[in-house]
Image (spheres, rainbow, N blue to C red):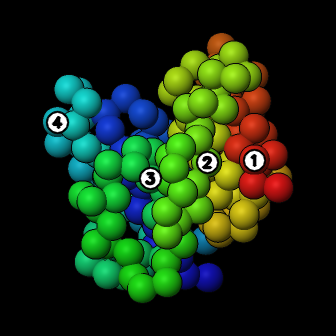
């Protein structure tokens, strides 16, 4: 198993939470995993990118044109971080409008289900998992969310993830 994933978003959208959950899932599967992240101006809504390398890799950074998957929490980040993806890479984007990627309007889905806007990150992860787009399956990611999310956010997080899985069907 080898998979290189980028998670791109804006500060406060939960990109680092997704990275942690994917890394925990890889570890639970007994797979080697390396992560890295760049926060930049995240505190002021600037871009954030994190990289997850699952499998026998040496360095933490994904070179341009080599990522297998991209999870984009904001469609504007396609212009910023898309160059990391290889030709034919799967792209999952939190977007209301379709494009040359798989999209789910996670923010609207969150609002329709009474979830906070930040829950869009887990909706996007559920959508990607439901489409078979990440190395870890829906069941394992559900377990990771239940185990690694603070109790006060657990129910909301699980509902958000399941909303994304349902949107993928």
| Lower position in the chain sequence, tag 2 or tag 3 | 3
Residue of label 3: 72
* Circle 1 residue: 167
The first of marks 4 and 2 along the sequence is: 4
Numbered disc 3: secondary structure? strand
Q: Give the SS element for disc 1.
A: helix
Q: Distance between the residues labelled 2 and 3?
A: 11 Å
Q: How crowded is mark 2: few (under 14 residues within 10 Å), some or many (20 or more)?
A: many
The quadrant the C terminus occupies is: bottom right
Crowding at mark 3 (Cα within 10 Å: few <14, some 14-19, many 20+): many
Reading the image, the residue beneath label 2 is 104
Report crowding for label 4: few under 14, some 14 to 19, many 20 or more residues within 10 A (C-alpha): few
Where residue 23 sits: x, y (%)?
A: 54, 56
Q: Residue 59 carries which label?
A: none
Q: In this view, does 78 lie above or below 167?
A: below
Which residue is rendered at x = 78% and y = 40% of the image?
A: 162
Q: Which mark is residue 41?
A: 4
Mark closest to the chain's N terminus, 4 or 1: 4
Q: Single out the mark in the foreground, 4 or 2.
A: 2
Of mark 1 and mark 2, the one earlier in the sequence is 2
The Cα atoms of the two marked residues, 1 and 2, are separated by: 7 Å
Counting from the top left corner in percent of width and height, residue 87 is at: 42, 85
| Contact (Cβ within 8 Å) of mark 4 with mark 2 | no
**Relative depth, front residue between 32 and 124:** 124
Q: State the quadrant of the N terminus.
A: bottom right
Residue 76: image location, x then y, percent? 32, 49
């Amino acid at each position: 198993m080898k998979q290189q994933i980028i998670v791109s978003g804006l500060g406060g959208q939960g990109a680092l939470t997704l990275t942690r959950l994917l890394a925990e899932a890889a570890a639970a599967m007994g797979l080697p995993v390396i992560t890295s992240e760049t926060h930049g101006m995240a505190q002021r809504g600037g871009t954030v990118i994190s990289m997850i390398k699952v499998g026998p890799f040496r360095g933490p950074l994904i070179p341009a044109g080599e990522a297998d998957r991209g999870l984009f929490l904001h469609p504007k980040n396609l212009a910023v971080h898309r160059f990391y993806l290889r030709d034919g890479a799967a792209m999952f984007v939190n977007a209301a409008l379709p494009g040359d990627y798989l999209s789910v309007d996670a923010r609207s889905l969150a609002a329709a289900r009474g979830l906070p806007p930040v829950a869009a990150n887990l909706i996007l992860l559920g959508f990607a998992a439901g489409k078979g787009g990440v190395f870890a399956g829906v069941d394992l990611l559900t377990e990771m969310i239940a185990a690694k999310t603070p109790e006060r956010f657990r129910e909301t997080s699980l509902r958000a993830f399941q909303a994304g899985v349902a949107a993928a069907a």
